[in-house]
Image (tube, rainbow, N blue to C red):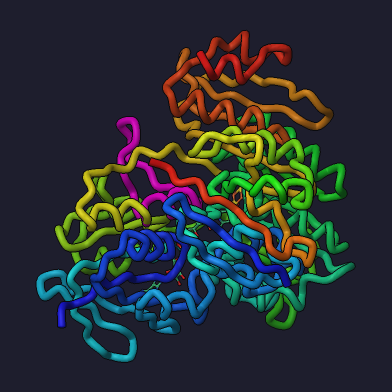
Amino acid sequence: MAKITWKMQDGTVISAEVKDGLNLMEAATANNVSHIMGECGGCLSCATCHVFVAHEWLAKTGEVDDIEDAMLEMTEVEREENSRLSCQIIASPELDGLLLHVPEPE
Amino acid sequence: MASPIVIIGAGQAAASFVSRHTALGSTQPLLLIGEESHPPYQRPPLSKKYLLGELERDRLFIRPLDWYAEQGVETRFNTRVTEIRPAARQIAVAAGDIIDYDRLIICTGSSARNLPAEIGGGLDAVFTLRSIADIDRLSPEFRTGRRLLIVGGGYIGLEAAAAGRQLGLEVTVIEMAERIMQRVAARETSNYFRHLHSSHGVEIMEGAEMIRLVEAGGRACGAELTSGEIIDADLVLIGIGGSPNIELAQAANLECDTGIRVDGACRSSDPYIYAAGDCTSFERNGQQIRLESVQNAADQGDLVARVIAGEDVSYTALPWFWSDQYDCKLQIAGLNIGYDQCVVRPGDKDQTQSIWYYSGDRLLAVDAINDPKAYVFGRKMIESGMNPRKESVASPDSDLRAIAKG
Ligand SMILES: Cc1cc2nc3c(=O)[nH]c(=O)nc-3n(C[C@H](O)[C@H](O)[C@H](O)COP(=O)(O)OP(=O)(O)OC[C@H]3O[C@@H](n4cnc5c(N)ncnc54)[C@H](O)[C@@H]3O)c2cc1C
Ligand code: FES
């Protein structure tokens, strides 16, 4: 289990205990986090699961592979150095307390 | 109480509509009616990870079952809608109830085509692949050592072939057309996938016309080809495409052609009825088309919610699609309908390449094979109406990012 928090631009937060092994796009849609759509179901074809990882957590969320790196060019809100596609972050005890900022398109 | 917005069919388009409708904060009540026993789920994994047994059932669900009630959405699964009565703004369901609607959204999707019963479509050990229930029937037979015959070399057939090999089945694919994927892709893409499957031990037979399935004791045990050849099999999977579920709409006299005809706002010919997903047909670049893709279902479902909320929007999203076979990822941006030339761009690694479809000088679509950069930048170029020179696209040394920036 890991407690994950999504913070929206207006400051509202959603927190949830997420089962190990689930990816954080699935966790977000299950918990009704808006703007995270996950259209491709997590297979790196849509980039609709974009999040900004709180800087202090970047190292723990793992490496961005080549496919994710390319797909991050396609996000609706432009990528920043802490951008991730949340379908590629898998819940585990090390991520307990993780904070994600949710980009909001115009 | 005001009548609800009723959604017929609880699949990808319906889920997208409901998500957007609730996210927009609309208080108008929703009633979601679906024939299957599950809440809306993703179908793509059915021929991929779910068939391989690598994904639990609940993880297919687009939203967890509880989510709908939490959002105040009333659901009726296991319920088939049998009639639409546009004049009375009512529908009838199989149990006999009559339900009033304020607006109706038809999201009935499409069905997998089977072979006609005369040539063996109804035999045991013959399967189609469209739903969780289909996989429940197929899985017990989908086992190591079995001989799997796949009729049809399109995406679903080829994905199932890959899953079959990964699970140790012996796999033969027969394709009637001159090459696999003929309907959806250029020769270059077919060639790549033929090679991919052959190298994984799939026997691919192209230009192979089947007369009938061969039967033994009520079970299919192979296929007879026009060449006289008999292909033995323990199970047969039919992957010959889908047909849209438009019978309800036709019976209600909604305008239909290859699908339920909708305008740019997904309105049908009845002002209170909308349609979204596989069951619709719509105009794109002067042609009437129908798509079977997650993108189309999700974007149309989303659009209908916005239209009903009063937004002035129309459907212009660029189509995209993907297919996963073995470790190979095919990503497609755009629609290649009407292409007259293809340009192949080698990728920067082994086994990577992209195929760029042109009509004259206009870029229409890109098939990117293990080459997500080509997909991303190709998609950007098409979205912004950019038509890169063929020579620059074909050169592996050109910088796609720079080209896409213009
Ligand atoms: C095996 C497989 C693999 C696929 N892979 C990909 C892929 O990799 N990428 C991609 O983009 N797309 C893929 N697709 C296509 C994609 O899944 C569909 O385009 C998408 O599901 C269409 O959504 P929809 O809402 O229109 O229809 P569906 O999701 O099919 O939902 C329609 C629902 O309506 C119900 N229904 C129909 N008639 C009635 C009625 N009278 N009353 C009540 N309910 C009714 C049906 O039972 C069904 O549950 C795949 C499809 C399949 C089957
Ligand atoms: S869900 Fe599509 S890329 Fe993450």
Classify B6 as above or below B106: below
Q: Looking at the picture, tell me which residue is in the foreground, B254 or B374.
A: B374
> Seen in the image, is B47 located left or right of residue B102?
right
Q: Residue at x 26, y 63 (%)?
A: B250
Quadrant in which the N terminus of chain B is drawn: bottom left
Q: Is residue B293 within the magenta segment? A: yes
Magenta range is: B280-301
> Seen in the image, is B350 located left or right of residue B41?
right
Q: Looking at the picture, tell me which residue is in the foreground, B207 or B330.
A: B330
Q: Looking at the picture, tell me which residue is in the foreground, A103 or B176.
A: A103
Q: Residue at x 30, y 83 (%)?
A: B93
Classify B173 as above or below A75: below
| Image coordinates for residue B185, horizontal then vertical, percent | 59, 35
Classify B322 as above or below B66: above
Q: Residue at x 58, y 48 (%)?
A: A51
Tally of marks: 0
| Image coordinates for residue B88, horizontal then vertical, percent | 11, 75
> Seen in the image, is B45 located left or right of residue B62?
right
| Residue B322 visible, this orientation | no
The quarter of the picture where residue B28 lies is: bottom left
The quarter of the picture where residue B83 lies is: bottom left
| Residue B148 visible, this orientation | yes
| Image coordinates for residue B361, horizontal then vertical, percent | 47, 13
Q: Residue at x 22, y 82 (%)?
A: B99
The quarter of the picture where residue B393 lies is: top right
Q: Is residue B122 within the magenta segment? A: no
> Seen in the image, is B354 located left or right of residue B80?
right
| Image coordinates for residue B147, horizontal then vertical, percent | 82, 65
Which residue sits furthest left? B87
Q: Looking at the picture, tell me which residue is in the foreground, B113 or A60.
A: A60
